[in-house]
Image (spheres, rainbow, N blue to C red):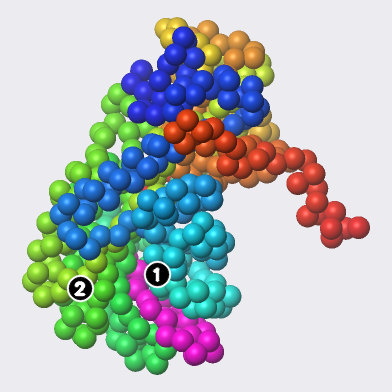
Amino acid sequence: MILPPSLSIREGHLCVGGEDCNGLTERFGTPLYVTDGDRVLANYYAYSTALSSRYTQVRVLYAAKANGNLAILRMLGKAGAGADVFSSGELQLALSAGMLPEDLLFNGNSKNAADLTLAVQKGVKVSVDSLDELALLDSVAEAEGKTAEIAFRVNPAIEVPTHPKIATGLRTSKFGIPHEQILSAYQAALSCEHIQPVGLHCHIGSQILDMEPFVQEAEVIVDLAGKLVDLGVPLQFIDLGGGLGIPYRHATDPAPTPEDYAARVLPVFLQGIKEAGIRPAFWVEPGRYLVADSTVLLTRVNSVKEAYCRFVNVDAGFNLLVRPAMYDAYHEVVVANRADVPPLNMCTIAGPICESGDILARDRYLPVVRAGDLVAILDTGAYGFAMSSQYNARPRCAEVLIAGKTVSAMRRAETVEDLIAPMEDCTR
Ligand code: LLP
């Protein structure tokens, strides 16, 4: 098996960032998310370098929804990243991680007055998703005695080769304003007293391994940018969103890099802004690419059962990693305490949740697996912990960060008391 760069094998044991997974679980227990912080930074620098070597005004806004752990936000913030935040909660996380309001963009198709008030009070730009939201923001800004700087989220109606649930710029998607209505939306914004349109925003989907849809997106957006100049919109930035995928099937998936992305998209952007006679900043919002391959989910085998197939029952399920159940997502699997043994047995990795769909990996060839073994589910840094739940009253697990030689918990495991407390407060 081809391992992602943060993983290695030492004396038959899987290591993350050089740390033995078996030792980590002795110390922190299972299930356990383990993240190689150096890998996150390397991914970030790959992105920012690929873009800034082609254009001077570039900003990388990390999509905080992919993994909102404060330690990761802090690390990326220190490295120079801003953030795409999709809720008041993510906005506050990014600020508490030390990111600056001007380095954030508040996205979302359904924000309420409290969300918009927070954005205006903190001075965070808003990507507006509807004319109703525009009117609400105008009144919120008036009440706060401020002017809100905005972009509109454009729906460019672009088909993308990814799972339909994570395509976000289809004609049928809930996100954004249809591109044919966008000029009148900006006209409406220009006539609002407490709104200043300064940007243009788009995001076409996630886990995209083909560069062509990104090129199409850039073409639609720079074409709109030219028309906005004619309307008198002072465009300070164009944000093309995130979406660059990773090769979950390491041996066979294409593995486009930020360099591939930049080499295809930047020329379209540069040509477009030249024709429009403007020099807005170029923003992107990668989530998955920065964090996915930095992390493994370690889970203990409780039992192995020969039934319809060989079920390997582990202690993590879709409560901790919902991607396989939700999108039929594929994550590679390694037996972490026998990582150098040839794969001989076909196994299905089943979680502990009371749902037939709670399967983390189906029909995989693995070394002989026994109760007590440790299984690693790879590439779980994006939309892993972030989408976890407490279903079946299972407290969420801890997360560990390896940064250089330092190993530390970046989130403690929840306890049953954490589950009970919010209810007890109400029912006492
Ligand atoms: N910007 C916006 C406005 C977004 O909606 C998203 C993701 C991103 C940036 C980051 O996209 P990325 O670079 O991570 O592809 N839970 C799904 C993915 C949902 C993505 C939703 N939007 C999954 O586990 O595959």
Q: Residue 14, percent across and down? A: 47, 19
Give the labeled residue for mark 1.
Answer: 102
Screen quadrant of the N terminus: top left
Q: Residue at x 67, y 38 (%)?
A: 413
Residue 28 to residue 283: above or below: above
Give the labeled residue for mark 2.
Answer: 225
Q: Residue at x 25, y 60 (%)?
A: 58
Distance CA(mark 1)–CA(mark 2): 22 Å
Secondary structure, mark 2, is: helix
Q: Identify the amino acid type marked 2.
A: Ala
Q: Residue 289, percent across and down? A: 35, 43
The circle drawn on residue 150 is none
Secondary structure, mark 1, is: helix
Q: Quadrant of residue 99?
A: bottom left
Crowding at dot 1, Cα within 10 Å, few <14 / some 14-19 / many 20+, comes out as: few
Residue sitting nearer the eye, 74 or 110: 74
Asked whether mark 1 and ligand 1 are closer than 8 Å, the reply comes as no
First in sequence, mark 1 or 2: give its number.
1
Screen quadrant of the C terminus: bottom right
Residue 132 to residue 301: above or below: below
Q: In the rendered structure, which segment of residues is drawn in magenta?
A: 130-157
Q: Residue 57, percent across and down? A: 22, 63
